[in-house]
Image (tube, grey):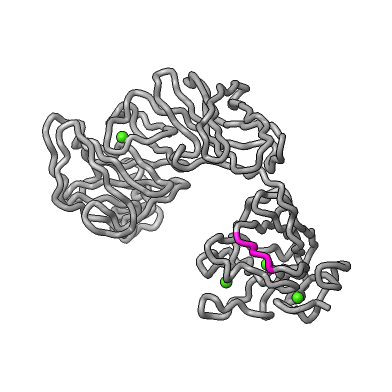
Amino acid sequence: MRFTTAFKCFVSLFVTGSLIFLGSCADDPTEPPVVTKDEGVYINEIHAAGPDWVELYNSTDESKSIGNYLIYDDATNKYKLPATTIPAKGFLIIFCDDTGVGLNTNFKLTSTGETVYLENASGELIDKVTFPEIGEGQSYGRYPDGSTTLKVSGSTTQGASNGETQAPVILQVTRVPLVPELDDAVTIQAEFASTADVATVKLYYRLNSGTYTSANMTKAGNFYNGTIPAYNQVGKVEYYVEAKNTAGVVSVHPGNAPENTDDFLLNTDPLPALKINEFLAFNSSCCPDDDSGTNEFDDWIEIYNSSDQPVNIGGMYLSDDKNNPFNSRLPLDNPAATTIPAKGFIIIWADGSREQGPLHLDFSLSNAGEDVALFYIDGRMIDSYTFGAQTENQSMGRSVDGAGSWINFATPTPGASND
Ligand SMILES: [Ca+2]
Ligand SMILES: [Ca+2]
Ligand SMILES: [Ca+2]
Ligand SMILES: [Ca+2]
């Protein structure tokens, strides 16, 4: 690496015949920093899908003081560690939570992957690790501790040895059907990064907080499949997948199961009398969203309640994809905001800004056209509409509230009758 830098500097010098380049390339910010000293202290494990942390490992036979050492993911924002000692063959966890106090750094990690650097008190780079995208409950670490072999693991060993082998990595778990009904058997499929060292995979499931039943899943390529048998009872079905490798190391999906699980609702409620009544997908000057304190010209969706009773849409979902019912869930904890009066309207901002309030969604609507869809709490579709390219500041809506054909409105009527 040093040779490469020197070589580039030489070329620059030769071409330009000037010393200016020689001076600048000694500190060339485009050159990746190089580990210049091995102190036997390593970045041993990284968890980046929140809460973020870095595990340091002291591979030497003596305790090691790391006061004033620097850890960072951005050379312009190095974090100085407090006076701390890592025991011989011991571990230390540094939380990357952007608080900037003690063992809590002034930066967070990016779950899609980046590089973390560790410098000693003299500013010499003693380790760096570039990690790939890692999911919740997964980590990237050295196997065994302190070695040069880095792998993604399907589970974490915060503050403890990484062991000899990483846990199986479950990339995703899907189900068919996505929205089960009473008496449907449900197929659960777990996709693995590799099944080479996987010994057993089990599916755990239960209805209405009962006792978990486990079933072995069957291997098919990089997948393992299992079945939740049909229930003839309404309620909530929770499930998770547990995989064990040939060394007995276990991972689960979701990452923190069984505290968190995947779930679906078996529900026979009649669907509420709600309609997507109007929307504006191309807003530049019509009807601003002022929930942030300034006027934002965001997309919006109007829903009409055609019944004679108020309807609380908390827990229901809106989506810009008819095939993705669980896209953006309306909050359960604010019925005052999410209840639509009888024969009334509600406006929900499709602005990708959930933090702006209860009536804001994770997505916006494409000016070029896509779906707008409303789903019940269990994922059953209540209403949907597929639209094409939109005219700036014009809405589309039903010609009669809750009914009629879809037409363009040169003068949108957010929160008011279309009639
Ligand atoms: Ca560990
Ligand atoms: Ca838009
Ligand atoms: Ca907004
Ligand atoms: Ca309207």
Q: Residue at x 78, y 68 (%)?
A: 306
Is residue 164 rendered to the left or right of residue 407?
Answer: left
Residue sitting nearer the eye, 32 or 320? 320
* Quarter of the image with the N terminus in it: top left
Give the magenta range. 310-314
Is residue 139 rendered to the left or right of residue 277?
Answer: left
Residue sitting nearer the eye, 198 or 125? 198
Residue sitting nearer the eye, 1 or 206? 206
Task: Count all numbered tags in the image, as a single digit.
Answer: 0
Q: Residue at x 53, y 69 (%)?
A: 357
- Residue 170 lies, in percent from the top left, at 51, 33
Q: Residue at x 57, y 71 (%)?
A: 336
Is residue 327 rendered to the left or right of residue 306?
Answer: left
- Residue 276 lies, in percent from the top left, at 75, 65
Q: Is residue 25 above or below residue 259?
A: below
- Residue 369 lies, in percent from the top left, at 76, 61
Q: Is residue 291 above or below residue 261?
A: below
Q: Is residue 19 visible?
A: no
Q: Quick check: is 276 in the magenta stretch?
A: no
Q: Is residue 84 above or below residue 27?
A: above
Q: Residue furthest right?
A: 405
Magenta residues: mostly which secondary structure? loop
Q: Is residue 31 visible?
A: yes
Q: Quadrant of ligand 3?
A: bottom right
Residue sitting nearer the eye, 309 or 158? 309
- Residue 284 lies, in percent from the top left, at 67, 77
* Quarter of the image with the C terminus in it: bottom right
Figure quadrant of residue 401: bottom right
Q: Residue at x 67, y 51 (%)?
A: 325
